[in-house]
Amino acid sequence: MASLVRHVTFDCADPHSLAVFWAEVVDGALGEGDVPGDPEIEVNSEGVSLLFIRVEEGKEVKNRVHLDLVPKDRTRDEEVERLVALGAKQFEDHRRPDGAGWVTLTDIEGNEFCVVRSAAERVATGTA
């Protein structure tokens, strides 16, 4: 038998604030009863369950694991604009002149994540 992933877990300073940010990113909802000040906050969405746990240590180095986001109903560039408006910061730009590539952003606590092209964009160019 194989294992299933229950959550992707983030260590963080402020679980509630980070969970609210990510709930907007993934169109999810906070766990029932989760409130500011809780040491653990859950976000559930159609595609993923995220867990945010308060830790004392700050982030010091690059993530060893990160999320790659695929926009459902907009282009990669439109999604990057939306996420920056939510408080993300552009970290690295790996877009190529042919339209391929991705953008690396950081969330409100500095965790890196990437935004790749939507399925529609990949179909339009005939590339993965």
Image (cartoon, rainbow, N blue to C red):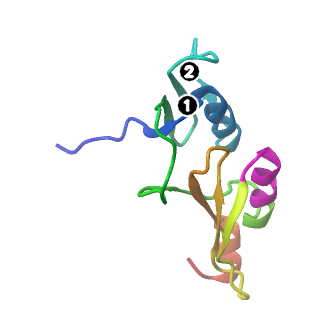
Q: Which residue is drawn at 68% across and 57% down?
A: 71
Mark 2–mark 1 CB contact (< 8 Å): yes
Residue 65, percent from left and from top: 43, 56
Please indicate whether residue 42 sits to the left or right of residue 109 in the image. Answer: left
The numbered dot on residue 98 is: none
Amino acid at pointer 2: Gly
**Looking at the image, residue 10 lies above or below residue 76:** above
For label 2, the residue is 31
What stretch of residues is rendered in magenta? 79-88
**Looking at the image, residue 68 lies above or below residue 47:** below
For label 1, the residue is 44
Residue most extreme to the top: 33
Q: Which of marks 2 and 1 is nearer the N terminus?
A: 2
The verdict on residue 85 being magenta is yes
Residue most extreme to the bottom: 97
Residue 59, percent from left and from top: 51, 48
**Which quadrant holds the N terminus?**
top left
Amino acid at pointer 1: Asn
**Which quadrant holds the C terminus?**
bottom right
Which secondary structure type mostly characterizes the magenta part of the structure? helix
Report the front residue among 60 and 111: 60
